[in-house]
Amino acid sequence: MEDLRKSSFTLVISLFLVLILAGCDPDKDNVNMTPPEDSDPQVTLITPSTGLILASIGETVEAIFEIHDNELLTDWWATERWESVSGVEVLPETQIPGQVAVIATQSQERSISYTIPTSIQVYTTIEIRGYAQDNKGKIATALVRINVIPGSDSTVAYELESYVDDTVYSITTGDDYNFDLIQRLRGNDGEIAPANRYIRESSIPPAIDYIITSPISGAVDSVLVTTNTSVFNFEDCTYETIYQAFVTSNRIGSSTDPLGPGDVAILKLPNDPHFAVIMVKKAENGFMTFDHKRSYE
């Protein structure tokens, strides 16, 4: 009997020690019982990596998007939007036929093969957007742009007129700071009509930085792009190369950068869809001498 009591006591002590040791598990308190936070879905453009495609009417191009979510993606769709070279919306954002899907995945690549419609005008920009939605209703998107350029058999044929050695003075001089690209005249505000002020030297006194703006009134103000002859061939440029340089530039605005010899400014003229391109030859002593070309039809 005595032995039985000793065995029972030993068993109780052993169980007690096991429970104590189990409660002292050093890893027990490090277990994260909080569920992982749901992050937003992601859409990444894989191809083209630049985000820009140049294509002709009838040509088929491909864009590849990667979609991802840490829980679950439920929907995919893609849209197109058309905009003219002057910034006018031609086609509002519209779902692309065949580019909608109900999915159940965390990660996937989605490919879009897009044929440039025959009904579109040359020099239109097409925006393709890919969308992904997760199971919480969160939506992500990524964008690729297609600039429609003439094909080898295109009937679009804008010509360029070329002019050399024109001059505009800095606004700090008080005179001849406006230039009419059509009439090839310079003057101050009293001499050049508002609708003909295609370019103006717009330094902020007392500095003379040779900055160009285009304060045309009575029409949409011109938009300007700044580049230079190291990346843009002024001498052999065509309408197509001017257009491509304009729409692919990341230096677009209502004024140019400060200009010096060799710099090039491209102006989107208000008489759509035409451009003027100016190459600076000299910028000193308060005036700027430049060659320029202007498109016409």
Image (spheres, helix red, strand yellow):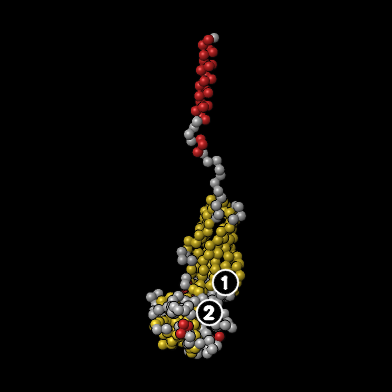
x, y percent for residue 228 = 41, 76
Disc marking residue 222: 2
Q: Is residue 88 above or below residue 137?
A: below
x, y percent for residue 83 = 56, 73
Residue highlighted by disc 1 = 82
Q: Is residue 235 visible?
A: no
Q: CA distance from mark 1 to mark 2?
A: 21 Å
Mark 1 vs mark 2, foreground winner is 2
Disc marking residue 120: none
- Looking at the image, the residue that sits furthest to the front is 206
12, 256: nearer the viewer: 256
Q: What is the quadrant of residue 1 in the picture?
A: top right
258, 8: nearer the viewer: 258
Q: Amino acid at mark 1?
A: Trp
Q: Amino acid at mark 2?
A: Ser
- Looking at the image, the residue that sits furthest to the top is 1
